[in-house]
Image (spheres, grey):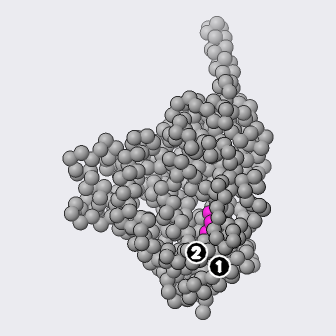
Amino acid sequence: MFLALTLIIIILVVLAYLDTKKPKNYPPGPRWWPLIGSAIEIMEARNRTGYLFQATAELADKYGPVLGLKFGRDKLIVVYGPEAIREFLSSDDLAGRPHDEFYRMRTFGKRRGIILVDQNFWTEQRRFLLRHLREFGFGRKSMSSMIEEEAAHMVEYLKETILHHDSVVFSIETIFNVPVLNTLWKIIAGIRYHPDDERVKHLMAIMSKLFGTVDMSGALFSRFPILKYIAPEMSGYNLMVDMHAQIYEVIGKVLKEHKASHNPNDPRDLMDVYLTALKSDNPGESFSEQQLMAVCLDMFMAGSETTSNTLTFGILYLILNPDVQAKARDEIDKVIGKERRPNLDDRPHLPYLECVVLETLRMFTGRVFTVPHRALKDTYLNGYLIPKDCQVIANLHGVMMRPESGFDDPEAFIPERFLKDGKISLPDNYMPFAMGKHRCMGETLARANVFLFLCTMLQNFQFSIVPECPPDMQMFDGVTPAMKHFKARVIPRS
């Protein structure tokens, strides 16, 4: 008995020691401890700085632009700095997507969707989706019309709310959620929701909570799987399961209605086209009804959350910089006037507003991480070994908010930085939608949304600080940055 116990202790000690050993030529970073990896130093830096993007930026200053970490059982590389990020995003060897349980649990325990898949599966689905999204307006003039219509609905909703409630104070952190969702959901499922739709508002609230609980490196229960059994609430596991179940319930209802009224000769939206493909003789190995639902999930979550949060950042910086707001509004008044709706054809004639959009995107994406990549084989980055299946993410603060990235006074909101001799000029390191194979496929819609919503809002309203509730610049530290407790006075222009 004693010998057996001694042997077990020796084995555990050896395993604990091996758990602290880094692979040869692994990127430098904090010390690894048994079971928890480098979690202690990461959490200390996160608590000290307030945010994971600042914590990893601080550690990158200490250890270098390619930061080697370990959370629980998972190895994670954080890339920081312009040269390293460009090398990373250009590498075919690092163009995979993670495939562990945390990411599979979103999509029926399998690799499904469009954001977190790779290789042939991703290529086939992306090609199909982009081709048919264009048919329903994606990147075309009709897309502008859809956004114009949604922005006009939002203007009327705000004016009616002000009239009926005798209040001009709005919680800006949620105001764009449903309208932005509608611009994408109309293309996907032919549906638009009213801003007061309680079901959708509830889903958006849960989604915001989830996005504030997990981050691009995963969640507590993914790094330490035992937590989903002993602390499912605290670790975010219950929230993750509940959120996806509710969204799938909504998607499933819409899909059922589409199947009942589906006419392959008269497709109404992307969902109809996909159902037609499923009924064809040779749809392709990556096509399935589960895949369709997973694609809708990805677009529902990613398409609405990131763009609405970007617009919130835009309004925040406009009320903090009233001179910028006034200059952009004057340009709109001169080019468009106060009666005609703005459209995307106006963009070349509104260079200052376009610079406001560019600066808004810089301020937002300068606080985000890219979607995780995966090493498809043992490879090298900046001279360091990246083991096969290791997760790699880029902290875009390193290219958007650092002086060495080409931005003077990067913490200041200065739209004029993009104007050179009256023309818009972008530094090489300006990459709000990343770059390479996995450059954001929703970039066209996102840029159009931010431009047209900001333009329409400035044409119709003045935004200012609520003196008793000024913005405190506090953000949720999750998948994407989101402002906390942000209200603004929204005054209709006469």
Residue matched to label 2: 454
Residue at (71, 41) in percent of width and height? 65
Query: Which quadrant, please, contains the C terminus?
Result: bottom right
Residue type for callout 1:
Ala
Image quadrant where one finds the N terminus: top right
| Rendered location of residue 406, percent (x, y) | 72, 56
Q: Nearer the viewer, residue 135 or 271?
A: 135
Side of 183 relative to 46 (left or right): left
- Upstream in the sequence, badge 1 or badge 2? 1
Q: Is residue 461 magenta?
A: no
Residue at image point 61% right, 55% down: 431
Residue at which label 1 appears? 328
As drawn, 41 above or below 329? above
Q: What's the residue at 73%, 59% (across, down)?
A: 407
Mark number for residue 104?
Answer: none
- Rendered image quadrant of residue 363: bottom right
Give how far across and how far down residue 442 sits, in percent: 48, 59
**Identity of the residue drawn at 42% across and 45% down:** 122
Residue ranking furthest to the front: 421
Residue sitting nearer the eye, 481 or 253: 481
Circle 1: element type: helix
224 shown above or below 482: above
**Magenta span covers which residues?**
357-361
Residues marked 1 and 2 touching at CB (< 8 Å) = yes
Q: Is residue 426 left or right of residue 63?
A: left
Residue 244 visible at all? yes
Q: Quadrant of residue 267?
A: bottom left
Q: Position of residue 240 (x, y in %)?
A: 51, 49
